[in-house]
Image (cartoon, helix red, strand yellow):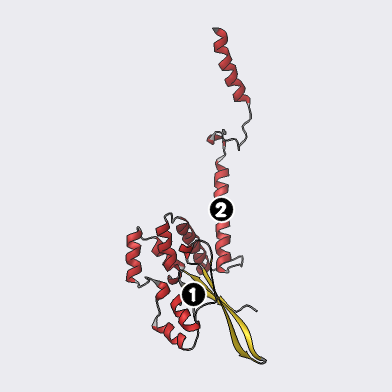
Amino acid sequence: MRLLILLPLLGLTACALLDRDPRSGYLDSGAIPGESARDLYVQRQKQNEMEAREELGLTSRTLSEDQASMVLNRMKLKRLEAGLKSESDKKQYFTVRSALGSDAERIRFLSLPGYESRARFVKARGLESPSEVVTPAHALLIETNDITLGMSQKAVTESWGDPDVVEIAGNPIYGYERWRYNRYVSGNEGYEKEQRVVYFEGGRVVGWERPK
């Protein structure tokens, strides 16, 4: 009977003497210094700040007060965007994201309480079906066969015609599209082939280029 009692005790003692590998999953949470969690948080914050600065083109070591505020807004926006869980919430946001002209406006939109309140915001601002909207200002640009940032896909089509190639990047709900045009334009040596590429986000122009 005594042997039966001693064996479990010996087993427990042997287990207690074993070193725990932090990756094993058996290490007591109390054995992890508080400094480690704090250091990890600080490292993540620094990484997020660096990414925000790169996106904003703020590469200098020192920032002005306004620039620092821009970085903080971008970091907050990234957190809010990452917090979008449902497909409907993501589609709602990325449909109007490019029409919301600043990080502050996007933060305001994402801070609204729930899908319905954001839908009312979209309707009040006239941001529904952005790919089909042609504003009076954009109509003037269409007359000169020009495009601009924020222009809808319909307006681009009316200005430059149908694209030769449409490419979709990632999940379609984000509205990331690239339209390629191949046109022949008059040059010094007759007609020359010119390529044009237009980038869309949520149905609106966010950039363009003319590759060589």
Categorize mark 2 by other alpha carbons within 10 Å: few (<14), some (14-19), many (20+). Answer: few
Q: Secondary structure at mark 1?
A: strand
Amino acid type assigned to the residue bearing label 2 in the image: Arg
Query: Measured along the vertical axis of the image, is residue 89 above or below residue 187?
Result: above
What percent of the width, then of the height, locates residue 81? 46, 59
Amino acid type assigned to the residue bearing label 1 in the image: Val
Q: CA distance from mark 1 to mark 2?
A: 32 Å
Seen as rendered, the residue at the extreme right is: 189
Q: Which residue is mark 2?
A: 44
Labels 1 and 2: the sequence-earlier one: 2
Q: Residue at x 54, y 55 (%)?
A: 45
In the displayed structure, does residue 133 sit left or right of residue 53?
left
Disc marking residue 176: none
Q: Residue at x 32, y 60 (%)?
A: 116
Disc marking residue 205: 1
Q: Quadrant of residue 126?
A: bottom left
Q: Quadrant of residue 21?
A: top right
